[in-house]
Amino acid sequence: MHFCRSLRWLCLPLIALATPSAVAQNLLVNPGFDRDLSGWLTSTSAQPPDNGQASVAWTASDASGSSTSGGVAFQATSEFGSAMASVTQCFSVTPGLLATMGAKILTTHSDPTSSASVAVSFFSSPDCSGIALGQASAKPDPAPYGVWSHTATFALASPAARSVRAELSATAYGTFFYGVGEVEAVADDATFTLAAVGTTTSILPSAAWIHGANGSYWTTQFTLCNPGPIDADVTLKWLGHDADGRGGLEFTYVVPAGQTFAPLEETWSINFPENWGAILVLSTSPALIVQGETSTPPSGGAVGQVVPAFGPADFAGATPKTLAPIRENAAFRTNLILANPTEMPLTAHVALYAAGGTLLGARDVDLLPIGMTQINRVAAALGASTLDLGRINVSTPTPGGLVAAYASVIDNVTNDPRTILPR
């Protein structure tokens, strides 16, 4: 875990550990490295440059023992920092496709911090340039040296993805604790496929790793539950707040049928410290249940709230959704969270009513594509400095628009939040 803290940017992706059953055409050029590395883009790097070295080359070593074919050999060594050797190919992709990358890997030497791997990375550019939106990767299963191990990973293309990079690599990390890192490996019989799969999309309106009012510190833990009969390939896309969420980082998970999984909270808190925002959820299983538990520790324990991912039935459209009760007084404060699950900008209309039905105030709130915002002390923001009991209606005048909305009524003494879901 401390290793990920020191190399934060390398720990963004989570590992996918299974192989999908879908069968599709292998899109790779020269996947068996028959005579050379033609069709592959080779790359080596070291950070810092004077503390590591890496190489990539064709080798006659073949997974099937053929004398007329070969593989790709990687070597990487780092005294302190990292060194990487890789071969890649880039493909166009459309949202919702399942990208699968696999290969046979023969490891001849590796230290605890170093390994060969396969990976898929998505980009918003058409040519795999720029910063990756997200990545899924996998390392070979532990096996005796000299044994070929089939290794595969896969991930869903999110709405912003326009290209995908298929990658074979070996990376060495040198650390103070482990010393010099080194890896030597050969890869062969690579496969890369893009398959159309049915996906469901939902949105978790908020998550946070941030200090708040009255000494609170809010952190979110996710739970992914798959009670269905098929494995769920899941992508969680960070949208942030008050911004266009289409370029947010992505994290890939696999939740086997019938199982429940909680991603490491630390992965998110390390990458998004003092931040909050919404999360887009894409899954190949309609049965997937996603819950976010956001809590803060008072003395002697913790207080918090559970918010589910919102699906189509939960969204407000031209017909309003109602949130009640809303309170804003000496004992309670209320925050309103609004999220846009669509890829178009829209306007949310928020109206506050007293207990007797009198309209106290209203506001139009602009939301960017798959964007999110939060209105703190929403009753006061809408014109009611004190409100013991009331309701909020949320709708959108934007044609085809949808809004996910919920309210959090927070005790001013204990910081204990209560979740008000739309009805």
Image (cartoon, rainbow, N blue to C red):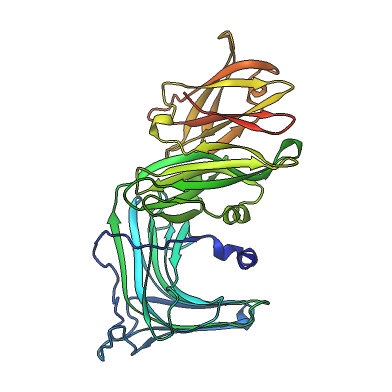
Tell me if I can see residue 243 in this picture. no
Q: Is 274 on the left or on the right of 317, as rendered?
A: right
Q: Is 322 on the left or on the right of 73, as rendered?
A: right
Depicted 227 relative to depicted 353: above or below: below
Q: Is 119 on the left or on the right of 330, as rendered?
A: left
| Along the line of sight, the residue nearer the viewer: 365 or 113 | 113
The residue under the point 61% across, 83% down is 180
Q: Residue 55 at x, y = what percent?
A: 48, 84
| Along the line of sight, the residue nearer the viewer: 10 or 142 | 142
State how many labels appear: 0
| Along the line of sight, the residue nearer the viewer: 42 or 316 | 316
Q: Residue 5 at x, y = what percent?
A: 64, 63
Q: Where does the N terminus fall, quadrant-wise?
A: bottom right
The residue under the point 35% across, 66% down is 101
Depicted 78 relative to depicted 289: above or below: below
Q: In the picture, residue 304 is in which quadrant?
A: top right
The residue under the point 59% across, 11% down is 355
Depicted 321 relative to depicted 184: above or below: above
